[in-house]
Image: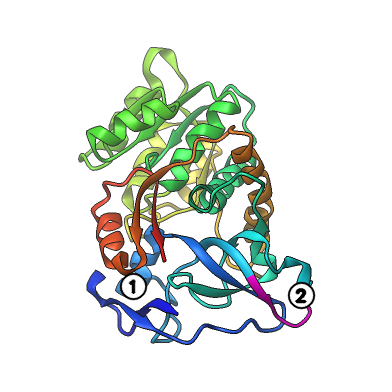
Amino acid sequence: MRAIVLHRTGDPDVLQPADLPAPEPGRGEVLVRTEAIGTHFAETRLRAGTLPGMPAALPAVPGFEAAGVVTAAGPDVDTALVGARVAAMAVGGSGSYAEYLTVPVSGVVRLPAGVSALDAVAVATPGAVALALVRTARLTGTEQLLVEAAAGAVGGYLLQFATEAGAGRIVATAGTPAKREHVLDLGADVAVDHRRPGWPERVAELARADGRRGLDVVFESIGGASVGALLAAMAPGGRILLYGNLSDQPAAIGAGDLLPRGLTLIGCSGAPGDGAWYDTTLAARDEVLERLARKQIRPLIDSVLPLADAAEAHRRLEAGGNTGKIILVP
């Protein structure tokens, strides 16, 4: 099979096409022939060697998301899955930047009739993360929200689900004029440039304009010093849902920052076996795919590239100009 192999960490050009034997499904796994492969910003950090604890060993086939057809089932797996069209979250098994991958059966979900592989891989994982975040936030329909990096894969679905939940007002951040227009089209009330120095102060101005009390909920994906700077924009009793770290810097915030105003910081991340968050995200995939089939979700696809162009996909992800998923096809 054709695959993308990471022999060493470094710039995008270390992602090299190669011919490899197709993997075989182990106990509790299925083999999936990929039709669409999702790329994710975190994979650029894995490739660069800056993602803590990963990659565990090299050489390796990177990638965590795909959609395709189950072609074989390992021991202890219902063979009725063979032939099923599925979306796969490949944490465990082999990497998804390949024509075939193995994945634990718990990581696959059947695609509803009429849902394409491209749309499925664009929605399944980022849409499930966004739905889990919105539900964890327990929105009542009155809150003022901040969605950071709102033109990204997860951010775009956060806007759709928060709008559906009846958010009182949504402030969004995006790094280019085109992205800011995009997030306004997706439901944001106002958009701020998070690449401009002092942007948290601008968010605070907007959050308190016209007598508003501040931000009730922050969907935090940037990290670094800006997390602490945003505290001035928050309403008493507000909550921060921390789910990303685009800045590559730890969130500069501690208990002493939260206590004076009764703020809550909720960590929304984790791997299999680490806690409830991963399982919550897995469970949300069925619902987001059913919503996709009913055309209740707008799939967000930036571009589609051949598998051999994985390095170009990573360059685009790192440049930050994409609005939605960059998808690879075998």
Whether residue 237 is visible here, answered yes or no, is: no
Q: Secondary structure at mark 2?
A: loop
Residue drawn where x is 73% and y is 66% of the image: 81
Q: Is residue 113 visible?
A: yes
**Mark 2 lies on residue:** 77
Tell me if residue 226 comes above or below residue 205 in the rendering. below
Q: Earlier in the sequence, mark 1 or mark 2?
A: 1
Residue appearing at x 78%, y 67% in the figure: 80
Instruction: Mark 1 vs mark 2: give the one in front.
Output: 2
Residue 253 lies, in percent from the top left, at 42, 52
- Frontmost residue, 315 versus 3: 3
Q: Which mark is residue 47?
A: 1
The x and y percentages for residue 97 are 43, 70
Residue found at x 51% / y 62%: 66
**Residue bounds of the magenta highlight:** 71-77
Examine the rendered structure and indicate whether residue 204 appears above or below residue 122: above
> Residue 245: horizontal and vertical position, in percent?
39, 56
